[in-house]
Image (cartoon, rainbow, N blue to C red):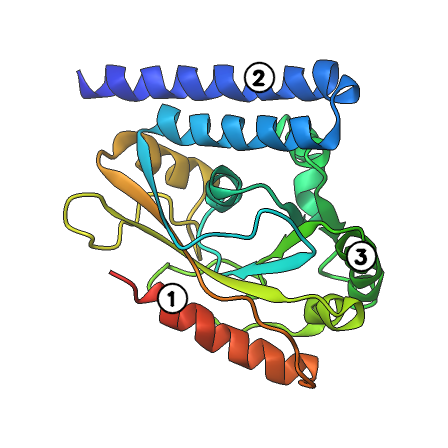
Amino acid sequence: MHIFRVLAKVLGLLLHVLKGWWTIRRHFPQMDAAAQQREVEAWSKQVLVVLGITLRVRGSMPAHGPLLLVSNHISWLDIAVVHAAGYCRFVSKSEIKHWPLVGTLATGVGTLYIERAKRRDAMRVVHHMAEHLQAGEVVAVFPEGTTSDGRGVLPFHANLFQAAISSQVPVLPMALRFVDARTGVPHDGPRFVGDDTLFGSLWRTLSANNIAAEVAYGQPQHADGRDRRTWARDLQRAVEELHQFR
């Protein structure tokens, strides 16, 4: 019976992804920005429902930007979790743009892509981030630059913080965790780090029960004269503190 439950989740997830793809291709051009954002939030919440994952949120994100959101990074599922808690425009690695179906979804919701292998591309992305921040948007980044096992926070790369400094906008620290919904113990199902494969991580997630995705928002910070490296270290500590919440 367990395998049938997993297969039902697989089918439900595939159908939901196809629904999102169709919505972006067919309906997004007729929607205004607010309607698109509501659709993204609703779609992301349903992803978690399909996977049987409970969303828990502590604190809140401001209803409007301009704001740079920074978080630790654990899984391919993180973007859906963050969007389910509140819409933002993500900065993500350029490879995602070319993934089947997922690339269309990511591009459709306004993702900004960075070519991590090219150092100079960071400045191009900082410029585009600043444009969106100055337009009053919420932009989100994973400044660790890679995923971790979810039990701690890796050092933050500072380059993208220049967008917030140049635009004179606040940064909101946020922490992500996946835990057993009953015990609060970290759950490795959605983990996607090291030798983990996307298929393996997806299968563990689909096979598991009682996963909770926990989001904790901190307090917005302004640069207050700090350079991007100093600010990155301070924000890393803020995310580490949020990551310890129970």
Left or right, residue 67 beside residue 181: right
Left or right, residue 81 beside residue 8: right
Q: Residue at x 44, y 25 (%)?
A: 46
Upstream in the sequence, badge 3 or badge 1? 3
Q: Position of residue 38 (x, y in %)?
A: 59, 29
CA separation in Å, label 2 and label 3 = 33 Å
The residue identified by callout 3 is 134
Against 63, residue 126 (above or below) is: below
Q: Amino acid at mark 2?
A: Leu
Q: What secondary structure is found at the residue carrying circle 2? A: helix
Residue 39, label in figure: none
Q: Position of residue 150 (x, y in %)?
A: 37, 59
Task: Decide: few, some or many residues near mark 2? Use Cα within 10 Å; few <14, some 14-19, many ≥20.
Answer: some
Farthest-out residue, front: 63
Against 167, residue 38 (above or below) is: above
Against 38, residue 211 (above or below) is: below
Q: Position of residue 72 (x, y in %)?
A: 48, 61
The residue identified by callout 2 is 18
Query: Quadrant of residue 221 in the image?
Result: bottom right
Q: Quadrant of the C terminus?
A: bottom left
